Amino acid sequence: MRRKVLFYVLLAAATLGLSQFFAAWRTWRAAPTFDATGTVGALGAALVLLMLWLGFLLYEVDRAAGQVRRRVGLYEWVLARRREAGRRSGPWPVGHPSVGPGRRR
């Protein structure tokens, strides 16, 4: 249930973000200023991340159902990291910067 809600929230954010990106793009094309360039870059990066996250959610569900024909390397890497992190008993990964000599948990 949580995954479905997250998917729809991300889909709505991506849809609204795409309209904002196109508005910023038109502004930048009309008057290419530094501020407009930064806005287009930030919105574009956020949009790419949203799309990757949406794709990952769909891939994860399809993979669990056994419907994936071709594996996607980036998503497989994320899933492998999740499985690896789930096997560790502590709250932090062993190599986490907050765990080390002179540091308390």
Image: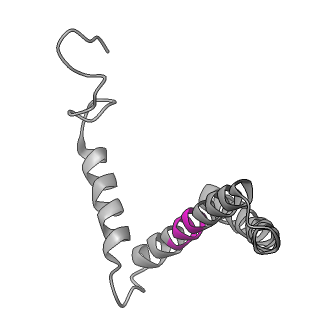
Location of residue 67 (image quadrant)? bottom left
Q: Determine if residue 1 is in view.
A: no
28 vs 73, nearest the viewer: 28
State the extent of the magenta-drawn residues as a range.
48-55
Q: Is residue 95 above or below residue 100?
A: below
5 vs 12, nearest the viewer: 12
Rendered-image quadrant of the C terminus = top left
- For the point 35% across and 78% down, the residue is 72
11 vs 37, nearest the viewer: 37
- For the point 28% across and 27% down, the residue is 97
Q: Position of residue 82 (x, y in %)?
A: 34, 53
- For the point 56% across and 68% down, the residue is 48
- In the rendered picture of this protein, how many numbered marks are placed on residues? 0
Q: Main secondary structure of the magenta part?
A: helix
Q: Position of residue 38 (x, y in %)?
A: 66, 56
Rendered-image quadrant of the N terminus = bottom right
